[in-house]
Image (cartoon, helix red, strand yellow):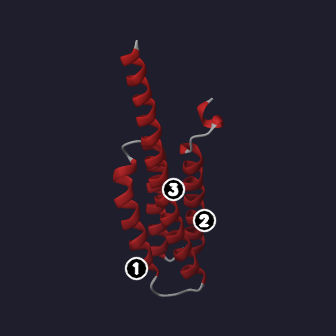
Amino acid sequence: MYKELIISIIIVIVIFVTNYITENFTQETIVAVSQSLEQVKEKIEKEETEIQKEVNETQVKWDRARNKLAYYIEHDELEKIETELIAMTGYIEQGEYAEAVASIEKTKYILEHLQEKEKLSLINIF
């Protein structure tokens, strides 16, 4: 009986620690990508010429994080973000900046939704 209690406590502790680590990584990733998207949006609004460089940096940030996020986040959610990033890139390459800004806002919304969805809270448990 005593061994089972110790094992159960260790398992619960491991679950909470793992959740804390993954939640922090998710939070940091979402903040970094959102800030990068905001910089792209600002460059579009100011009609700067180095927009493509910022878009590429955003894509690199996302690609690095996506591989780690895929271990514990639903792939459908990651695909939604990936789709919007690709659409944004296409709009910028074609010079359709209004659609690119709309795609940026949609991507930021999906990221915020993902952040709320992955948080450990009573609403998400029940």
Residue 8, compared with residue 27, is above or below; it is above
The residue under the point 44% across, 47% down is: 22
Tell which tag, 1 or 3, sits nearer the viewer.
Answer: 3
Tag 1: amino acid: Lys
Q: Which residue is mark 3?
A: 27
Q: Cβ–Cβ below 8 Å for labels 1 and 3?
A: no
* Eye-nearest disc, 1 or 2: 1
Quadrant of res 3:
top left
Asked whether residue 44 appears in the rendered view, the answer is yes
- Badge 3 crowding class, 10 Å Cα cut-off, few under 14, some 14 to 19, many 20 or more, is some
Q: Secondary structure at mark 3?
A: helix
Q: Are marks 3 and 2 in contact (CB under 8 Å)?
A: no
The image shows residue 109, relative to residue 22, as above or below, that is below
The span from disc 1 to disc 2 (Cα, nearest Å) is 19 Å
Identify the mark at residue 53; answer none if there is no mark.
Answer: 1
Check residue 107 in the rendering and tell me which mark sits there, or answer none: none
x and y percentages locating residue 21 in the rendered image = 44, 48
Residue positioned 60% across, 72% down in the render: 98
- Neighbor class of circle 2 (other Cα within 10 Å; few <14, some 14-19, many 20+) is some
Point out the tag, 3 or 2, that comes first from the N-terminus: 3
Q: Which residue is mark 2?
A: 102
Would you say 83 lies left or right of 103 here? left
Mark 1 or mark 3: whose residue is earlier in sequence = 3
